[in-house]
Image (tube, helix red, strand yellow):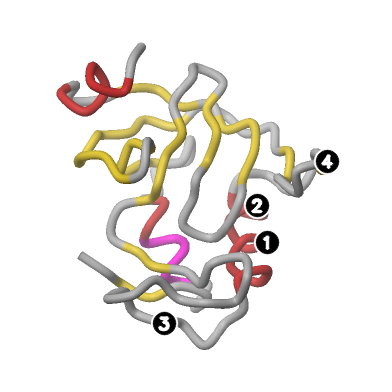
Amino acid sequence: MGLLTLVSAATFVCTPVAVWDGDGPIWCKEGPKIRIAGIAAREMDGTCSRGHPCPSSSAVAARDALVRLLGGPKGQRDSGHIIVRAPAMRCSADGQSYGRVVASCRLSDGRDLAQAMLATKTVLPWR
């Protein structure tokens, strides 16, 4: 499924296979890369994107919190991406950003992924 198709789709499935940082991208087995809607995390170089909230937690702490929510690390790619093997999530596309689908997702246990990340206190709300 192409990015334009996903952006206009109401819902889609994402089976996470890799994570870069605390708000994404999350690589989906089905193809898309997701940026989690409604939250902001530090970039992996420790900076915060201009105009975004800047959490006090490190990028590594946020990434590791996301990886734990997705079942824990299963390895690491040469690129630095953390490999995960997580159950499929149901996601709703909210738009696109830098070639990624901005999406709201529900974990397999029904929890909202953004809310679960906010509960870790490693990210801040952002719209």
Neighbour tally class for label 3: few under 14, some 14-19, many 20 plus, Cα within 10 Å: many
* Res. 54 mark: 3
* Res. 78 mark: 4
Label 4 is placed on what type of residue?
Answer: Asp
Neighbour tally class for label 2: few under 14, some 14-19, many 20 plus, Cα within 10 Å: many
Residue mark closest to the camera, 3 vs 2? 3
Q: Main secondary structure of the magenta part?
A: helix
Q: Residue at x 52, y 41 (%)?
A: 26
Q: Which residue is drawn at 77% across and 47% down?
A: 73
Q: Do the residues labelled 1 and 3 touch (CB within 8 Å)?
A: no
Q: Which residue is drawn at 66% across and 55% down?
A: 68
Q: Does the magenta stretch include residue 32?
A: no
Q: Residue at x 35, y 64 (%)?
A: 39
Residue 30 location (% of width, % of height): 49, 17
Q: Are marks 1 and 2 in contact (CB under 8 Å)?
A: yes
Earlier-in-chain disc, 3 versus 4: 3
Label 1 is placed on what type of residue?
Answer: Asp
Earlier-in-chain disc, 3 versus 2: 3
Magenta region: which residues?
115-119
Earlier-in-chain disc, 4 versus 2: 2
Label 3 is placed on what type of residue?
Answer: Cys
**What residue is shown with label 1?**
64
